Amino acid sequence: MDNHRKDLYPDVTASGGLGPAMKAAAELRGCDIGLQPWAADVISIETARGYVSVHPATDERRFRMRVLIPGFTWDTPGFSWEIGSTGDLGLLVEAVAAWREGMPLDELAATFEFLELDEFARAVANGEPASSQWSGLLSSDFHRRQRNLLCRLRADEVLRDMFPTVTHGAVRLRVDPLDGTSRQVLVHELDVERYEVMRVGVPGAAWVEVPTGDLIAYLRVALSTP
């Protein structure tokens, strides 16, 4: 921790890192934040509503609370978004504990005024992030090249329940959005008649060319087969 951050976070420095400081603050308040014993400065806590991470700001005293949907590999680290920040470490650990314990979102927002629970945060907390993610991708100009493929995949009653992302131009479908190792595929559109599909995480995985007429059936099988 550099000297400037030491000035902003003397309590964190005195505790030996953000992890020990959060654990001490949680103990004082009788909170269970589920923090691993070895946690130091990189804070990531697994919950039933995504991973919660905490990051100190460098320009002012602010503990930024984020929710993360994990990726699968080092080059697909996942998606995180800030749901609020506060300079009060005690208030922060209380909010982390409440999120982890499943406090209803309206009650969370009323209890912790620093939290900003947008539509996507609510979708994750309610266990339904896929629908929100589909809408976000389809309305994004950045992913307009994948829009036709996204529309086709979403139109299927099975595939629309998968969690979609776009990775290096390919559409990734994952069975469980909160489990980075769950079954998933990459779909790359070669042209209107041909696609390439890869089953991610399967030994010896490689791109397989799939005709357009077989695409949906192929993906259904790939995502249902261990």
Image (cartoon, helix red, strand yellow):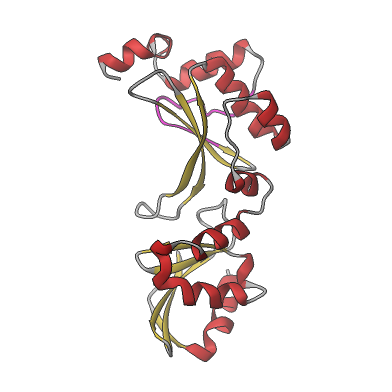
Q: Nearer the viewer, residue 170 or 225?
A: 170
Tell me the residue at 48%/76% (across/down). Answer: 149
Q: Position of residue 224 (x, y in %)?
A: 61, 72
Q: Main secondary structure of the magenta part?
A: loop
Q: Quadrant of the C terminus?
A: bottom right
Res 33 seen here: no
In the image, taking residue 148 as reference, residue 41 lies left or right, namely: left
Q: Quadrant of the N terminus?
A: top left
In the image, taking residue 57 as reference, residue 113 lies left or right, namely: right
Q: Is residue 93 magenta?
A: no
In the image, taking residue 58 as reference, residue 15 lies left or right, namely: right
Q: Position of residue 67 (x, y in %)?
A: 53, 40
Seen as rendered, the residue at the extreme left is 3
Res 183 seen here: yes
Tell me the residue at 73%/30% (across/down). Answer: 107
Q: Nearer the viewer, residue 36 or 81?
A: 81
Q: Position of residue 181 (x, y in %)?
A: 51, 56
The magenta segment is 32-45
Tell me the residue at 69%/47% (across/down). Answer: 126
> Does 183 appear above or below 68?
below
Tell me the residue at 36%/68% (across/down). Answer: 169
Q: Is residue 33 magenta?
A: yes
The count of marks equals 0
Q: Position of residue 183 (x, y in %)?
A: 54, 64
> Does 96 appear above or below 213?
above
In the image, taking residue 30 as reference, residue 72 lies left or right, namely: left
